[in-house]
Image (tube, rainbow, N blue to C red):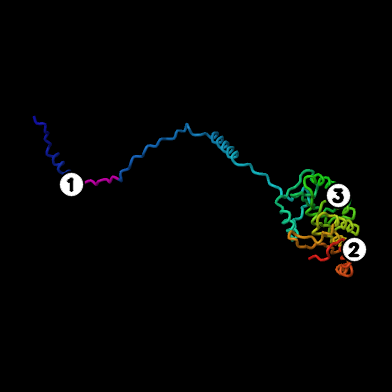
Amino acid sequence: MCSHVRRPPEAQADAVAAQAAHSLHPEPEVPVASVRQAPQYVEPPDLRHQPTQEQERRHAQELSRLQGEALPAKAPPVKPSHFTPSVYQRQQPSSSSSEQLYRKEHGGEQHRKQHRGGQVEGLTMLGGGSFEVSMRGRGMSDEQVISWCQAAKNQLASLSSEFSPLHAHQLNFAENCLGSEGVGAIFEMLSDLKIGVRKIELHRNNLTNGAASVLAKYIKECPQAIDELHLSHNQLDRQGVLTLVEAFMTAGSRGVPRYPPRDIRGRCRPVWLRLEYNNVHRGVELLENGFEEEFRRLRGGKGFPCQYA
């Protein structure tokens, strides 16, 4: 029995027509690239393991704590070495040649420090047994200076066993109301403690010939040479000036004059003595006319050389 089914003539005609049409107008081929790829499957995040806001906050706090422990603590600000507990500011050190020479001879100021035990106003300790006093422009009277000297003497005496000898880099009592009593208290304290002073500033006070006599005594007894003595704008007269100059000319012992001082190379250097604006007229003529020979005689009597070469 034949399994072939014979199509009707109409169906055969339609099939032949469709085949002919396909051969004339074939369907366009679709490029592979234009076929849209199916999206890849992405695993959704597991929200069960996400940190909460509270956990993030605690983590940030812990991180800050660990960073704070790892970094060194911020050091407190360092006060300047020249700071003194006073409303008055100390003047900056001068840059004169004598100042530079002092720093060279004493190793500069890298060891500068302040003594904090029983600090006296205006008194600053430096390295190596050196100190300085800055009491400029305080309007101090003789009584106030005498009281200050008592406190300063107690502090300096306590340091004399540790640093011997003590020496003052600068003593500044300028622009006050000092007279002979106040100056006498200052230099009596220095003489008792055998303290030498390099630079003395007493200008713009009320100093008379009595103060000049006190200074002359200290100049002769001072254990070291004075480089600068500022006495301008006071009330010294002719006799007071001669008293000071005579003290400088005759200071020394055992045939060795203390003035003029010498630097580290052995060369003579002058003393800066300021006496302008006092009751002295024609001061240069005063020293040149007759008094130079008197000073030579005084130095010769002590065995000092008269030539300064």
Alpha-carbon span between mark 3 and mark 2: 29 Å
Q: Which residue is tagged 2?
A: 237
Quick one: label 1, few (<14), some, or many (20+) residues within 10 Å? few
227 or 34, which is in the foreground? 227
- Which segment did they paint magenta? 21-32
Say what amino acid the circle numbered 2 marks: Asp
Name which of mark 3 and mark 2 comes first in the sequence: 3
**Residue 89, numbered circle:** none
Residue that appears at 90% across and 59% down? 209
Tag shown at residue 23: 1
At which x and y percent is residue 208?
90, 59
Query: Which is more foreground, mark 1 or mark 3?
Result: 3
| Distance Cα–Cα, label 2 vs label 1 | 142 Å
Residue where numbered disc 3 is placed: 192
| 170 relative position to 3: left or right | right
Whether residue 222 can be seen here: yes
- Dividing the picture into quadrants, the one containing residue 106 is bottom right
Dot 2: element: loop
**72 and 249: which is toward the camera:** 249
- Report if residue 229 is visible in the image: no
Amino acid carrying label 3: it is: Asp
